[in-house]
Amino acid sequence: MQLNQKEIESLIPHSGTMSLLNKVLNWDSEHIICLANSHRNKHNPLKNRGVLSSVCGVEYAAQAMAVHGAITQSGPNKGPRLGYLAAIKNLELLVDSLDDIESDLMIEAKLLMRDTTFLMYQFRIFSEDQNHISGRATISIKEKSIN
């Protein structure tokens, strides 16, 4: 099932130009693939001195993980739960910046572990089968929803 940007914004606490993902292309209980073209937006809010550093890809991945967590959560809590990026491990930045990549970015995240208080994902960002960023992230989850 695919999701558009408006549907994505209803699942995460970001909106407007800070909502970086354009589409969810595919997802299941352990995996999500998203598409983004906001890295080419000259008004991208993550740009510093006109450059979108590759380290900003972590935010793209974090938004994909947040969407995945929201659409796969179970239990009585109906609203999205607040999560915080707690740790990044094995981060590989294979490009210097994202804004000079002409093709759309694909953001892929695979759930490695889920608990009531944290999620752990392996992620990568690529385009046209060329890897740009990869790593592992731990997300700390709050008990109450953000609604």
Image (cartoon, rainbow, N blue to C red):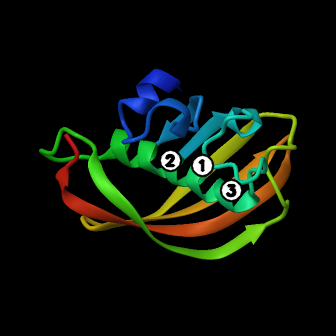
What's the residue type where badge 2 is placed?
Answer: Gln
Foreground of the two, 77 or 95: 95
Whole-percent x and y of residue 134?
A: 70, 63
What's the residue type where badge 3 is placed?
Answer: Arg
Query: What residue is shown with label 2?
Result: 63
- Residue at 60%, 41% (x, y): give it: 33
Which numbered marker is on residue 60?
1
* Mark 1 in CB contact with mark 2 (< 8 angstroms): yes
Q: How would you rate the neighbour count of disc 1 (Cα within 10 Å): few for under 14, some for 14-19, many for 20 or more?
A: many
Determine whether the residue tagged by mark 1 lies in a helix, strand or loop. helix
Residue 136 position by quadrant: bottom right
- Numbered disc in front, either 2 or 3: 2
Determine whether, in the image, residue 24 is placed left or right of residue 92: left
User: Which quarter of the figure is the C terminus placed in?
Assistant: top left
Q: Earlier in the sequence, mark 3 or mark 1?
A: 1
Whole-percent x and y of residue 123?
A: 62, 58
Query: What residue is shown with label 3?
Result: 124
Determine whether the residue tagged by mark 3 lies in a helix, strand or loop. strand
- Alpha carbon separation for disc pair 2 and 3: 13 Å
- Alpha carbon separation for disc pair 1 and 2: 5 Å
